[in-house]
Image (spheres, rainbow, N blue to C red):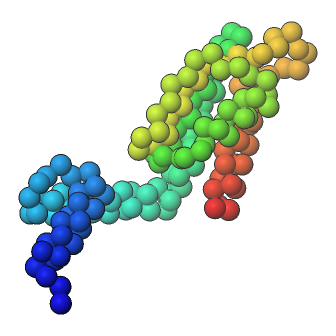
Amino acid sequence: MVSIEQEREAMFKKLQLLRSITNSHAHDKASVVLDASKYIKDLKQRVERLNQDIATGQNFPTIRVEEQEDDFLIKVFTTRNCQGLLVFILEAFEELGLEVLQATISTSDSFILEAIATRENKEADDHIDDRVVKQVVLRGIQKWIEGSEQE
């Protein structure tokens, strides 16, 4: 037979787990449950938003490349967090011989990259323009998508 003390201990552990999962700082049971309810509601909204993004095709990143004298301003944006995407984009830069001079990256709820890149070898004969940079970044994103689908 389970004692009342063991039941309390089990309930306490469950509340601690619920508190840690939902990032709740509440101490009483009712507040922890309320925080959990808000957390679940937020998760449902995020799932709905992601489903809408998928249905409308907004899942694919937007890419803008602007040529600025010897440099390129590269902007990549998507409404969802794309874990690992940055690595593939940087590999694409490397493949093209671009060196990142400055970058701002945000990956909290979405993926935002703004980078200024320049050619490592400016004396090379091959002409690299904004269209070429965009194509190589697109290939990097496509590789990331293919890798993500296999997982």
Report the label total.
0
Who is closer to the viewer here, 138 or 18? 18
Please, which residue is most extreme toward the bottom here? 1
Q: Nearer the viewer, residue 96 or 59?
A: 96
Look at the picture and state if 53 lies above or below 68.
below
Answer with the quarter of the image where residue 19 lies.
bottom left
Q: Nearer the viewer, residue 49 or 93?
A: 93
Where residue 48 sits, quadrant-wise, is: bottom left
In this image, 129 relative to 16: left or right? Answer: right
Residue at horizontal 11%, vertical 54%? 27
Residue 3 sits above or below residue 88 on the image = below
- Image location of residue 50, percent across then percent down: 43, 57
Image position, residue 31 (x, y; %):
10, 58
* Quadrant in the picture for the N terminus: bottom left
**Left or right, residue 125 beside residue 129:** right
Could you tell me if residue 41 is visible in this image?
no
Residue 132 screen position, x and y as percent: 77, 30
Q: Quadrant of residue 5?
A: bottom left
The answer to whether residue 61 is above or below residue 2 is above
The C terminus appears in which quarter of the rendering? bottom right
- Counting from the top left corner in percent of width and height, residue 13 is at 23, 65
Q: Is residue 114 above or below residue 85?
A: above
Q: Residue, x 48% and y 46% (percent of image)?
A: 81
* Image position of 70 (left or right of 81): right
Q: Residue at x 53, y 55 (%)?
A: 57
Q: Residue at x 79, y 23 (%)?
A: 97
- Mark yes or no: residue 145 visible: yes
